[in-house]
C-alpha cells in the first residue's frame, strides 16, 4: 500500500430527504431506494474498484433482528436492518460504510482468505472515513430470547450444552475434541441427550 487514497465524503441531501411534520416530534428518514447503492458504487469507483462499483447492491432485510448489517462477497451485496431508519442518520451511514468496508477488503484481496475484521478491513474503514471502527455495533436493537429446552452432555468431561433446537446429526464436545483429538471429530466425545 504505497500510496494513500483520499477519504470519501458523504453528501446527505442527494440520497435522503428529511421530513418534519407537526404531529411527529422527531425527524424521520425516508429512504431513496437507489441512493444507498449509488453511493456505494460511487465510493467503490473512487477506490478504483470498478467490478465492485458495477455489482454492489444495497437492500433492506426485514428478517434482521439484532444485526445492523451484513455484507455478502462475492455477491457484492449489503443487507441493512430496517430498524436503522429509526436511528440517527449517522448510525445508518456508519453501518453502510462498515459493511462496504467488508466488500472493499474482500475485493482487494481476491480469493485470499482474510479475517473479517482484520487489517484489510481496518484499512478499508480508514479509506471510507471511519478509522478505528469497532467490529460490533452498540445500537439498542432488542435481542429475542429463545428458551434453550434441549440439553446434551459430554460423556468424557460432563460439560452440559443447552440448545434451542434438538441436535439431528452427530456432534461432539468441541473442547474434548480439541484437547484429545487435534480438533477433529471423534465419536468418543459425541454429545448425548441429557435426561432431566
Image (cartoon, rainbow, N blue to C red):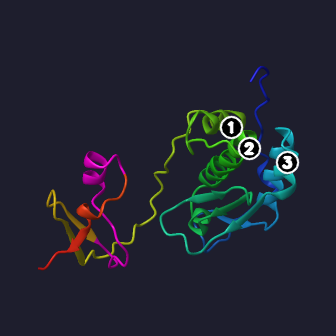
Q: Which residue is disc 1 drawn over? A: 124
Spot occupied by residue 68 in the image (x, y as percentages of width and height): 55, 59
Spot occupied by residue 189 in the image (x, y as percentages of width and height): 24, 61
Q: Which residue is disc 2 drawn over? A: 110
Say if 110 sits above or below 63 in the image: above
Looking at the rendered structure, which numbered label has been put on residue 169?
A: none
Residue range (magenta): 163-183
Res. 32 image quadrant:
bottom right
- 171 or 63: nearer the eye? 171
Say if 126 sits above or below 89 in the image: above
Q: Is residue 66 left or right of residue 110?
A: left
Spot occupied by residue 46 in the image (x, y as percentages of width and height): 85, 39
- 101 or 194: nearer the eye? 194
Disc number lying in front (2 or 3)? 2
First along the sequence among labels 1 and 3: 3
Q: CA distance from mark 1 to mark 3?
A: 15 Å
Would residue 168 be counted in the magenta stretch? yes
Q: Which residue is disc 3 drawn over? A: 42
Does the magenta stretch mainly form a helix, a strand or a loop? Answer: loop
Label 3: element kind: helix
Q: Which quadrant holds the C terminus?
A: bottom left
Q: CA distance from mark 1 to mark 2?
A: 14 Å
Spot occupied by residue 195 in the image (x, y as percentages of width and height): 13, 79
Which residue shows up at 77% across the image and 20% down it?
Answer: 2
Amino acid at each position: 500500500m504505497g500510496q494513500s487514497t483520499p477519504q470519501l465524503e458523504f453528501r446527505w441531501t442527494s440520497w435522503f430527504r428529511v421530513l418534519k411534520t407537526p404531529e411527529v416530534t422527531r425527524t424521520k428518514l425516508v429512504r431513496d431506494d437507489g441512493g444507498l447503492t449509488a453511493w456505494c458504487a460511487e465510493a467503490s469507483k473512487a477506490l478504483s474498484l470498478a467490478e465492485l462499483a458495477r455489482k454492489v447492491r444495497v437492500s433492506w432485510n426485514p428478517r434482521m433482528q439484532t444485526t445492523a448489517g451484513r455484507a455478502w462477497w462475492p455477491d457484492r451485496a449489503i443487507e441493512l436492518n430496517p430498524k436503522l431508519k429509526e436511528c440517527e442518520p449517522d448510525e445508518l451511514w456508519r453501518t453502510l460504510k462498515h459493511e462496504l468496508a467488508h466488500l472493499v477488503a474482500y475485493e482487494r484481496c481476491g480469493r485470499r482468505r482474510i479475517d473479517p475484521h482484520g487489517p484489510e478491513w481496518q484499512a478499508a474503514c480508514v479509506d471510507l472515513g471511519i478509522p478505528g471502527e469497532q467490529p460490533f455495533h452498540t445500537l439498542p436493537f432488542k435481542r429475542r430470547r429463545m428458551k434453550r429446552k434441549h440439553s446434551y452432555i459430554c460423556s468424557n468431561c460432563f460439560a452440559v450444552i443447552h440448545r434451542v433446537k434438538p441436535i439431528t446429526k452427530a456432534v461432539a464436545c468441541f473442547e474434548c475434541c480439541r484437547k484429545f483429538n487435534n480438533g477433529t471429530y471423534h465419536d468418543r466425545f459425541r454429545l448425548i441427550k441429557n435426561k432431566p
